[in-house]
Image (cartoon, rainbow, N blue to C red):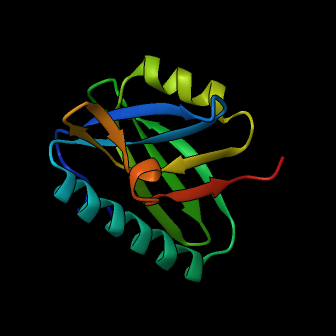
Amino acid sequence: MIDHFLPGGAEVALVMLGGKIPAIGPLIDTRQEAVRIARCFMDKIDALTERSRSFQIVTARQSDGRYALILQGEGVVTKVLHNIDELLLWRFRKAFRRGLFILTVFFKGDTGVECLAVTEGLGAVIYTPG
């Protein structure tokens, strides 16, 4: 598992961009840390796609009852999110039926929660053809 770059106790946020594309990721306290984690996400996803061209998106139940989101490819397994509660997972699965989501990072800004996919253009678009 490659999950050392994920913040241990971070909450997970989900928003619908344009009303139809789910953006999901950890919610971080500061913008600087959020940008660092988003860049790490991007680097890890780039490295994965160099090693495997096709992936499955798998949800795995954790010992505490919450869930982790995992990408599995040809000999590659990467945990991209953890500590997702059941309600958020249900909302994500419902939105993901379109086969597209954005893996990004959120931070607590002055005006509320901000999404780096919107403010900085940082995020990995994950697409599964139907």
User: To which quarter of the image does residue 122 belong?
Assistant: bottom left
The furthest residue to the top: 87
Residue 9 as seen in the image, left or right of residue 70: left
Residue 4 placement (x, y as % from top left):
23, 62
* Residue beneath the point at 60% across and 66% down: 73
* Residue beneath the point at 46% across and 52% down: 117
91 w.r.t. 33: above or below? above
Residue 12 placement (x, y as % from top left):
33, 35
Residue 36 as seen in the image, left or right of residue 105: left
Residue 31 placement (x, y as % from top left):
21, 52
Residue 1 is at least partly visible in this image: no
User: To which quarter of the image does residue 112 belong?
Assistant: top left
The furthest residue to the right: 130
In which quadrant of the rendered image does the N terminus lie? bottom left
* Residue beneath the point at 67% across and 32% down: 20
Residue 106 as seen in the image, left or right of residue 87: left
The furthest residue to the front: 111
Residue nearest the observer in this picture, 89 or 35: 35
The furthest residue to the bottom: 50
Residue nearest the observer in this picture, 37 or 112: 112
Residue nearest the observer in this picture, 4 or 40: 40
* Residue beneath the point at 48% across and 69% down: 45
